[in-house]
Amino acid sequence: DAKTTQPNSMESNEEEPVHLPCNHSTISGTDYIHWYRQLPSQGPEYVIHGLTSNVNNRMASLAIAEDRKSSTLILHRATLRDAAVYYCILKGSSGSRLTFGEGTQLTVNP
Amino acid sequence: DAGITQSPRHKVTETGTPVTLRCHQTENHRYMYWYRQDPGHGLRLIHYSYGVKDTDKGEVSDGYSVSRSKTEDFLLTLESATSSQTSVYFCASLWGPSSGANVLTFGAGSRLTVL
């Protein structure tokens, strides 16, 4: 399984942008980059995913490096409700084993 | 929302007793997963299923078994619970075929305490 590396923790102020990095140097050509987040005492939830091009949705933006070895989840204006653990995983088209790392604990200060 | 429900949501049991956690999904998803999460840590894959009666081991499968006799149900069994299996267990499902674009949907979790 291709592995991802994320910082253990990051901190931001409310209403400021947050850039959460993820390194995935062993990504294969067919791997999608997925982001999930886990709010306190809840199950993880899907945030965004992409293959090569940058992606935007109502929750966040995903910026993917040209060589695809890293990506950045962008929260344009952090709110207190965005405080969560954010996981970056790679999902391929073959096989179904999906593993998560430790994720990044995002703290948002008022 | 894939409609994944886990039961029980909370359970306290004693060391050596068998425990079964149930995951039920209503979306006809092909793939289902069991993860455990310990305090301050990420998710670790226990077992997963890629179809009825098709299962495989994850990262931390020792002490756990699973069964999938119907598409909608994925059962996780601890044959003889130990204190090290105290954890929060999350079930997830994924629609097939296995495209990289398909996303996981998680249940709310089952908190298990083994005394």
Image: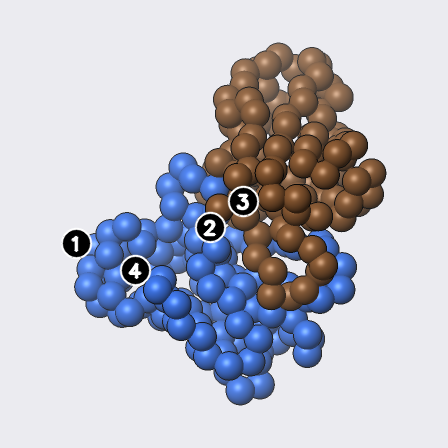
Chain colours: A blue, B brown
**Chain containing the residue with disc 2:** A
- In this rendering, is residue B90 above or below A27? above
Tag nearer the camera, 2 or 1: 2
Which dot marks residue A87? none
Name the residue that disc number 4 marks: A11
In the displayed orientation, state which residue is furthest to the bottom. Answer: A66
Residues under labels 4 and 1: Cα distance?
11 Å
Name the residue that disc number 3 marks: B2
**Chain containing the residue with disc 4:** A
Task: State the quadrant of the C terminus of chain A.
Answer: bottom left
Tag nearer the camera, 3 or 4: 3
Which dot marks residue A45? 2
Residue A23 or residue B111, whichever sits in front: B111
Tag nearer the camera, 2 or 4: 2
Residue type, label 2: Glu
Residue B52 or residue B11, whichever sits in front: B52
Relative horizontal placement of residue B64, taking residue A79 as reference (left or right): right
Q: Residue at x 46, y 50 (%)?
A: A45
Sequence-wise, the earlier of marks 4 and 1 is 4
Local SS, label 2: strand
Q: Residue at x 62, y 12 (%)?
A: B14
**Chain containing the residue with disc 3:** B
